[in-house]
Image: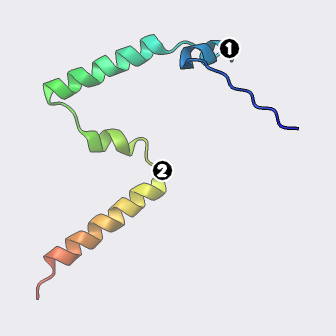
């Protein structure tokens, strides 16, 4: 026997169904703050992403940076 169940629900409906908090106002405020920083020129995307990267990825990025620096700065 095969049973197929299809549910058509929006993310908002799923959030309410599972009792998750409504974070739309916080999300809108964060987007507004990010847009203001980008517009003012006080925005460093690398610094922003480093806070989300695991430590191993940072080490890998340092290794890659070192590799490229040595590759192009090597005197023949």
List the single residue furthest toward the front.
1
Whether residue 70 is situated above or below residue 50 in the rendered picture: below
Point 22% across, 25% down: residue: 37
Residue 43: quarter of image: top left
The tag on residue 54 is 2
| Tag 2 secondary structure | loop
**Residue 11, position as x, y percentages in the image:** 55, 20
Of the pair 27 and 10, the residue shown nearer to us: 10
Inter-mark Cα distance, 2 to 1: 32 Å
In the picture provided, is 63 more to the left or to the right than 24? Answer: left
**Horizontal and vertical percent position of residue 7:** 67, 22
Spot occupied by residue 62 in the image (x, y as percentages of width and height): 34, 62
Residue placed under numbered mark 1 in the picture: 17
Q: Quadrant of residue 27?
A: top left
Q: Is residue 60 above or below residue 16?
A: below
Q: Secondary structure at mark 1?
A: helix
* 2 or 1: mark nearer the eye: 1
Q: Quadrant of residue 32?
A: top left
Q: Residues within 10 Å of mark 2 (few under 14, many from 20)?
A: few
Using the image, tell me which numbered label, if any, was put on residue 8.
none
On screen, residue 46 above or below 14: below
Question: Pointer 1: residues within 10 angstroms few (<14), some, or many (20+)?
Answer: few
């Amino acid at each position: 026997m095969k049973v197929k169940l299809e549910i058509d629900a929006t993310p908002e409906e799923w959030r309410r169904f599972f009792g998750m908090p409504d974070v739309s106002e916080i999300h809108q405020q964060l987007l507004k703050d990010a847009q203001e920083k980008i517009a003012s020129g006080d925005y460093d995307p690398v610094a922003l992403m480093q806070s989300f990267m695991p430590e191993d990825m940072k080490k890998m990025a340092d290794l890659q940076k070192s590799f490229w620096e040595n590759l192009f700065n090597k005197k023949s």
